[in-house]
Image (tube, grey):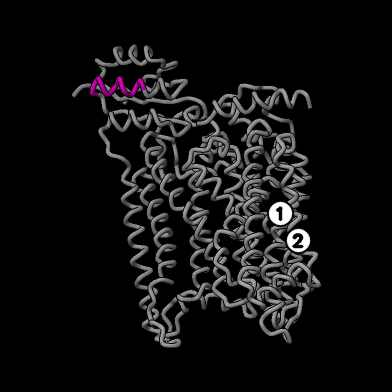
Amino acid sequence: MAAAIDTTNIEPTYLDVDRAVQQTLRPGGLKYWLWVLFCASMVALGLGFWTRQIYEGLGVTGYGQPNDWAVYITNFVFWVGIAHSGTLISAILYLFRVRWRTGVYRCAETMTVFAVATAGLFPIIHLGRPWYFYWLVPYPNERYLQPNFKSPLVWDLFAISTYATISTVFLLMGLIPDVANMRDISTGFRKWFYTIMSFGWQGTDKQWRNFSMVYLLLAGFATPLVLSVHSVVSWDFAVAQLPGWHSTIFAPYFVAGAIFSGCALVLTLLIPIRKMLHIENLVTIWHLDNLSKVVLFTSLIMTYSYATEGFVVWYTKDPVELVTFSQRFFGSQGYLAWMMIFCNCLAPLPLFAPRIRTNVVWLFIISIFVNIGMWLERFVLIAGSLATNTEPSQWRFYVPHLTEIAITIGSFGWFLMNFSLFAKFMPIVSMNELKEGITYLRQAVREVYPYRKAA
Amino acid sequence: MSVQTQLSASFRSDEECAEAIELLHRERIRDFRAFSPIMSEPIMEASRTAHEAPKSYVRFWVLFGGITGVLTAIAVTIGTSLEWNLNAGGRPIASIPPYIIIMFELMILFGGLSGVTGFFFHSKMPVFEPDPAYRTKFGADRFGLVVRCDDDQVNKLDSMLREVGAEEIVREAA
């Protein structure tokens, strides 16, 4: 597909922004559909194994005493964490009027919605009888049975469903002006689709006035959600009396980790997307540079959190905590914890160098390391802590079976398939906000231009 | 009753459009609407002043939704605890601290959804019959100002709008 935007144009106009985004929505070619098919086959693999698990029971997995929570809950926490950076970028940075968010926030928000949609599947997959998942919801019944609202699992249900709803509404609201723009230039099915999705938006002063208010308030609501949802997820563990879990630092530690992993995944997605969709002039090195600074900063917080965790264990001298902690690093699965330290604490350090932060290849490699590291962190924390509980006779390190591996692969396929389909039907970069900050975009393009010319 | 005409002016920048709105305000002309491809503070502010409109009412919807959410959470958590009266180790049947989390979540959920409902209500959306004055360019790279005025004001208004930067003005019967 030819680039509609002139890549040597260092003074993009409103129309350039529109054209650049509109050309990303042209029907996908063979490569695109092969990629979607590949993702769909990953989903089919996961679905197949889940069906087998439902039919035969959780015995087909590596689950068993004391490892009642393992890969599924790891995936749940991982995907919820991934979701958080989207809200951070779209809501918190919006409230602080951070200019570089305009190029990346739609992609991050989309990632949020599909990551939550993926995360929400795992507590259900984790159930032996998934068709009873609604038992967590309070509803009138003849037995007067109600969920226990003192349980973090019920808090989780409310937190995640609120987060999913508000994130989806936030994404759809932000899309309205851009979809209206697409409606004006589309024909056929797309015109019909965009007409429905734009709700008749025409950008009148009155519509914008109400839009700015509701968008601001939604951002205001989404901001505490970023902090609360992953705190609630962390309390699933911290409230339990299990060594390795029962810690007061879990809430901030989880929130920082969530932002860290999420921003890294935004980089992983944006770097190939901006190349494939020819939007390097909209999502510039300036945007990636700033995003990588967030990754670096949160990496340092993670390093500090790991150190604090170790210090607290050493300082309290609790023998069970000491054994759990030492098993985490020196037990039979200790290599996973060292890989986690490498990926989360050491691999992002080169980002201190501006040369690395402006090099897309390095950024992509580092972001992959962070993604792996953050998944490992959740695994080490969940499965590792359960493996060495207060009863040494029960100790057993969990090893995932084919079922969990296939379902995990399926979840990645599910996320990537949804994301890829969205990117071909909806503007993956916000046209109206980029136009609003066109001065900053021009500045960014001007700064990047000599670099690109040299390259 | 005098015959009315509709002038549809387009501008290159939002500052020019906002200036034109301020001009209409000075001329005490209120029957106008502006179109913008971006969320333009100058246009929104000028239009709000000209229409003597208060800040968006959407905030009250959000407040109402938020309060409803908290009250719903109180009713659900305490109500269900009393219905399933489980005494665990003598602890309170209805314990407020853990319920604050549910109250917080439902406040955000209800507040957000109510705000969006308010947005659709006050913006009169969905729009089933699009404004005929809307042009595709107003969603792309031009700012539009559509004014309805008496026939005898048309020429004067036309020249005033051109003076503040209108690049094209279309006259239509209102």
The chain holding disc 2 is A
User: Tag 2's secondary structure?
Assistant: helix
Q: Dot 2: few (<14), some (14–19), or many (≥20) neighbours within 10 Å?
A: many
- Label count reads 2
Q: Dots 1 and 2: beta carbons under 8 Å?
A: no
**Residue kind at label 2, given as amino acid type:** Met
Q: Quadrant of the C terminus of chain B?
A: top left
Q: Of label 1 and label 2, which has the lower sequence position?
A: 2
Foreground residue among A207 and B99:
B99
Q: Disc 1 and disc 2: Cα gap in Å?
A: 27 Å
- As drawn, the label of residue A58 is none
Foreground residue among A427 and A88:
A88
Counting from the top left corner in percent of width and height, residue B149 is at 27, 22
Q: Which residues are magenta?
A: B19-28
Q: Residue furthest left?
A: B1
- Residue picked out by circle 2: A42
The chain holding disc 1 is A
What secondary structure do most residues of the magenta stretch adopt? helix
